[in-house]
Amino acid sequence: MTSTIRVVLLALQVVAIALGLWLGNVVWNAVS
Amino acid sequence: MALGVDSMRAGTVVRKAMFLTLGTLLFILCLTMLYQSMRAVMDVGGSCASGGPYAISRPCPKGVGWIMPVSIVGMFFAGIFTFLGVFPDGGPRPYVFSWSALFLALGWNFLDDGFDAPGGGTSAGWLVCGFVFVAMGGAPLLFLLTPRAARWSLWGPDSRRADDHLHPYRPPPVRTSKAEPTTPTPSATSTPALPSQRADVVERLATLADLRERGMLDDDEYERAKAAVLGEETSS
């Protein structure tokens, strides 16, 4: 596995964490 | 190799990357909703009820009744997606941090409201839970944040190293018995037979000397045995 794909996968993880945090708060504010 | 991954088609690489990303996104989304709903319940005292035939003295905040169980189940499905998306050769393994993320997030809630309880003052029960949760979540991190574990968790297992070409595989040398004459093989990786024979002769001479010192061989027997060993070594 090349370094490039590993970096891409790590970057996707960072995006997923940020998006998950944001979506979770959006959903909570919408239903509460 | 496709998209930088050995023995995997491009479509499979994309699918696994999507599952890995989706699994992390779903886990964080569910954890955030669980965190918020837990804070909402603690703000009303730490317990609530909804539904059922009895009059409820403390109803749950809006949405908590379904968000809590759905987010917990969602985290399990997130784990499944993550396992489907992990690459065997490398790449991040985000699931190893899920335990710590869960217990540290919820432990923070306990400590935050434990030191500043809704009715004023502190809550010993919540503080105990808070310290226990933080310990449970923080202890694995002490190992996961070591350089080797962090590299395995975030970069993935090292199936190949950059200096592999400097250390090619060499099979171990084959020891031959003195009864079978060895023929040198033309293989570049075979070890020459002479050094192993010399080592064998030295070992046998040392054994003979040891036997003489212990009195199991007299001088004549030792000299005859030594001559036999050296005669064999000269003729081979």
Image (cartoon, rainbow, N blue to C red):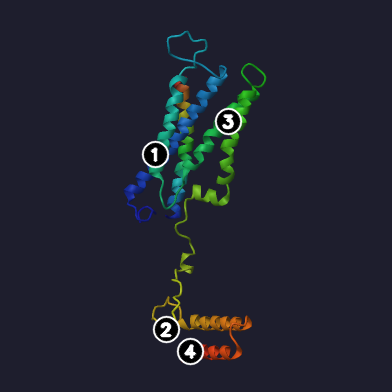
Task: Identify the amino acid type marked 4.
Answer: Glu
| Label 4: which secondary element | helix
Residue behind mark 2: B179
Do labels 2 and 1 touch, CB within 8 Å? no
Badge 2: residue crowd in 10 Å (few <14, some 14–19, many ≥20): few
Tell me which numbered mark, 4 or 2, is placed earlier along the sequence.
Answer: 2
Closest to the camera, between mark 3 and mark 4, is 4
Residue B189 as seen in the image, left or right of residue B146:
left
Q: Which chain carries label 2?
A: B
| On screen, residue B215 above or below A26 | below
Expressed as whole percent of the image width and height from the top left, the position of residue B132 reads 60, 32
Residue behind mark 4: B232
Tell me which numbered mark, 4 or 1, is placed earlier along the sequence.
Answer: 1
Residue extending farthest right: B121
Residue behind mark 3: B107
Q: How far apart are marks 2 and 1 (CA)?
A: 62 Å
Task: Identify the amino acid type marked 3.
Answer: Gly
Badge 1: residue crowd in 10 Å (few <14, some 14–19, many ≥20): many
| Label 1: which secondary element | helix
Q: Distance between the residues labelled 4 and 1?
A: 69 Å
Do labels 4 and 2 touch, CB within 8 Å? no
Q: Nearer the viewer, residue B154 or A5?
A: B154
Residue B212 as seen in the image, left or right of residue B14:
right
Expressed as whole percent of the image width and height from the top left, the position of residue B206 reads 58, 82
Tell me which numbered mark, 3 or 1, is placed earlier along the sequence.
Answer: 1
Expressed as whole percent of the image width and height from the top left, the position of residue B9 reads 32, 52
| Label 2: which secondary element | loop
Residue behind mark 1: B81
- What residue lies at 51% left-to-right and 90% top-to-bottom? B228
